[in-house]
């Protein structure tokens, strides 16, 4: 086996997914065949076709070794497989088009590469809470077929000098080696964390290291960051992302659509004035709109009624207003 292949094998075993290992094994078989080692190729191929013996546990854990913290080997990320991801979103057309453009560019990455172009792959989602930033990251992972790899700030942040940076580096190295949608949700946590806040110099170092890692990321996946804070968007940060996407509060049209979609598993009264209800909810987050619709539906089911009516939704709306006033 040549040195390049051997290095790839090691990398794939250390960082790759089952599919990566499988594809590399098949390349090795081909390589052996090309070199005239027909017998070896045949034997290797037979191994690939065999079922694993019962006493060997599914090897995904070992093969998809996720990065762990240096000090206590705690997982620094959480991988969410594609089939567990949600992807239905309601967005204003202009925002929907920008999400769609990221997905189309990713799908056309090979064609783009032929012209020396790269798809947008460093994405910053920002906007008010509860409007679909985290959901947007799930959707992007789902539509690109990449596993969503959520960075776990609880294990990544360390009070030991330099450790946070080392952990962050491990996360990026792993993302570089095996394609995923690396997701830094509420990335401002990094700068606000108490563990690192005691040392202003350390915060600056971490922020700079993050910017540098973003810039040097050349992996085949996506890096997605999300923040609620507009002020986190300084120009240095802007430059490092090739898509800065505001996920805004839903407008009247989106509120109406969110209500209808959430209530679609249950019958609704034909007399409901969706427009008036949506006007009454203007300014609310997508999350609150979904909550109102779900709450109305549950109330209706518990009362043994078949159809959700205007009143059910208005009651749920009044409740959420009360809750917000109490906060
Ligand atoms: N644009 C949207 N389309 C569909 N559902 C949404 C949207 N925005 C919010 N939601 C609902 O609200 C929940 C919370 O949204 P989330 O993505 O966590 O918000 P954020 O990350 O911006 O704080 C979602 O799981 C979803 O049920
Ligand atoms: Mg979120």
Image (cartoon, rainbow, N blue to C red):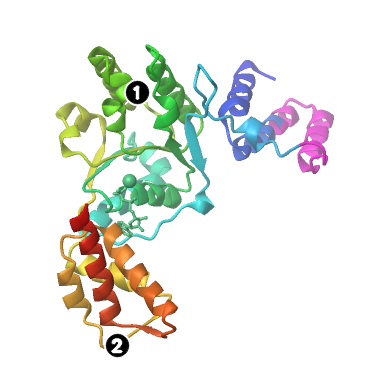
Give the residue pinned by disc 1: 213
Whether residue 253 can be seen here = yes
Q: Is residue 25 left or right of residue 66?
A: right
Q: Nearer the viewer, mark 1 or mark 2?
A: 2
Quadrant position of residue 172? top left
Q: Is residue 146 magenta?
A: no
Q: Is residue 231 left or right of residue 143?
A: left
Viewer-closest of 59 and 199: 199
Badge 1 element: helix
Q: Position of residue 251 (x, y in %)?
A: 18, 63
The residues colored magenta run 29-56
Name the residue: 39% across, 19% down. Answer: 164
Give the residue pinned by disc 2: 270
Name the residue: 74% across, 37% down. Answer: 57
Q: Position of residue 102 (x, y in %)?
A: 32, 47
* For residue 288, above or below residue 253: above
Viewer-closest of 107 and 313: 313
Is the Cβ of the residue at disc 1 closer than 8 Å to that at disc 2? no
């Amino acid at each position: 086996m040549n040195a390049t292949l051997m290095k790839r094998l090691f990398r794939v075993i250390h960082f790759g997914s089952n599919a990566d290992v499988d594809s590399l094994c098949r390349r090795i078989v081909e390589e052996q065949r090309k070199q005239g080692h027909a017998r070896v190729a045949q034997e290797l191929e037979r191994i690939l076709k065999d079922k694993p013996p019962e006493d060997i546990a599914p090897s995904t854990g070992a093969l998809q070794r996720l990065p762990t913290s240096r000090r206590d080997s705690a997982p620094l990320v959480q991988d969410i497989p594609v089939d567990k991801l949600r992807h239905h979103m309601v967005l204003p057309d202009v925002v929907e088009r920008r999400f769609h453009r990221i997905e189309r560019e990713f799908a056309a990455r090979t064609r783009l590469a032929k012209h020396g172009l790269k798809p947008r792959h460093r994405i910053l989602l920002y906007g008010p809470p509860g409007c679909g930033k985290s959901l947007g990251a799930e959707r992007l992972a789902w539509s690109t077929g990449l596993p969503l790899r959520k960075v776990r700030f609880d294990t990544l942040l360390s009070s030991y000098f330099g450790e946070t940076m080392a952990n962050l580096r491990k996360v990026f190295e792993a993302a570089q080696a095996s394609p995923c949608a690396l997701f830094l949700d509420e990335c401002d946590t990094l700068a606000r964390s108490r563990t690192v806040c005691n040392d202003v110099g350390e915060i600056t170092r971490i922020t700079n290291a993050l910017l540098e890692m973003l810039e040097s990321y050349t992996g085949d996946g996506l890096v997605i960051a999300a923040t609620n804070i507009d002020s986190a968007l300084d120009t240095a940060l802007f430059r490092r992302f090739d898509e800065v996407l505001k996920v805004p509060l839903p407008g009247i049209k989106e509120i109406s659509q969110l209500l209808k979609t959430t209530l679609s598993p249950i019958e609704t009264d034909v007399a409901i004035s969706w427009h008036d209800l949506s006007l009454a909810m203007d300014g609310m987050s997508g999350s609150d709109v979904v909550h109102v619709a779900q709450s109305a539906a549950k109330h209706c089911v518990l009362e043994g009624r078949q159809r959700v009516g205007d009143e059910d939704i208005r009651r749920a709306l009044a409740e959420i207003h009360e809750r917000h006033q109490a906060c």
